[in-house]
Amino acid sequence: MMTPCSASSRKEDSLIDREIAATRLSKLREALKRLKDLEQDHDAYMQSATDKDLAEHFLRLALEAALDTGNHVIAAKGLKKPLQLREIPLILGENNIIPKKLADKLANATGLRNRLVHLYTDIDHEIIFTVLQNDLSDLAEFAKEIGKLVDAESKKE
């Protein structure tokens, strides 16, 4: 005699791996800290090859860590698989994991990530400087939102 699988026997909880999420969020926060250390006046930044190189490196790391973390959450929750990187934050926003406004900003930021990774010979440091001055808080907000989610999921276990 076969026993039917009841709904209560299936695991309904998220499969977010706390360690994976924590490691990626730690990388994101560390990159943001290093980027904050680069905040300075425009002329000093534009004249410093070292600071421009560090900004490129740590901004790329921050964006990669955010996207990797978001992709992990999407997979763990069994959400629609993103076909492009820019879809990762959009899927998170559609599912109310992060605010939709933040999702739109981060989706646009994937364009910068792609430029940093693939078109590294054509970086506009005016744009990078503007990001350093105005947009790092978006990545910090993402880390905060995902951190809250991971904490809430851990308490369910």
Image (spheres, grey):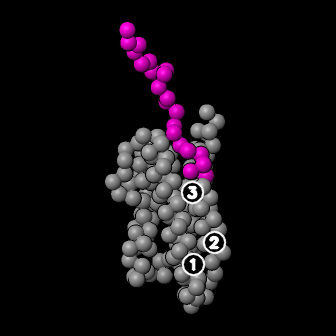
Q: Residues within 10 Å of mark 2 (few under 14, many from 20)?
A: some
Counting residues from the start of the chain, the first of labels 3 and 1 encountered is 3
Counting residues from the start of the chain, the first of labels 1 and 2 encountered is 2
Query: Does residue 26 appear to the left or right of 78 in the view shown?
Result: right
The one nearer the camera, 53 or 40, is 53
Residues at discs 1 and 2 in contact (Cβ within 8 Å) = yes
In terms of secondary structure, where does tag 3 sit? helix
Residue 74, above or below 27: above
Q: Which numbered circle lies on residue 35?
A: none
**What kind of residue is marked 2?**
Arg
Residues at discs 3 and 1 in contact (Cβ within 8 Å) = no
Which residue is pictured at 52% across the width and 60% down the height?
65
Q: What segment carries the magenta color? A: 1-22
Q: Position of residue 84 (x, y in %)?
A: 35, 57
**What kind of residue is marked 1?**
Leu
**Alpha carbons under labels 3 and 2: distance apart:** 15 Å
Residues at discs 3 and 2 in contact (Cβ within 8 Å) = no
Which residue is pictured at 64% across the width and 81% down the height?
40
Which residue is pictured at 38% across the width and 77% down the height?
119
**What kind of residue is marked 3?**
Arg
Please, which residue is most extreme toward the left here?
Answer: 83
Which residue is pictured at 60% across the width and 72% down the height?
35
In terms of secondary structure, where does tag 2 sit? helix
Please, which residue is most extreme toward the front here?
Answer: 1
Q: Which numbered circle lies on residue 54?
A: 1
Which residue corresponds to mark 2? 34
In terms of secondary structure, where does tag 1 sit? helix
Counting residues from the start of the chain, the first of labels 3 and 2 encountered is 3
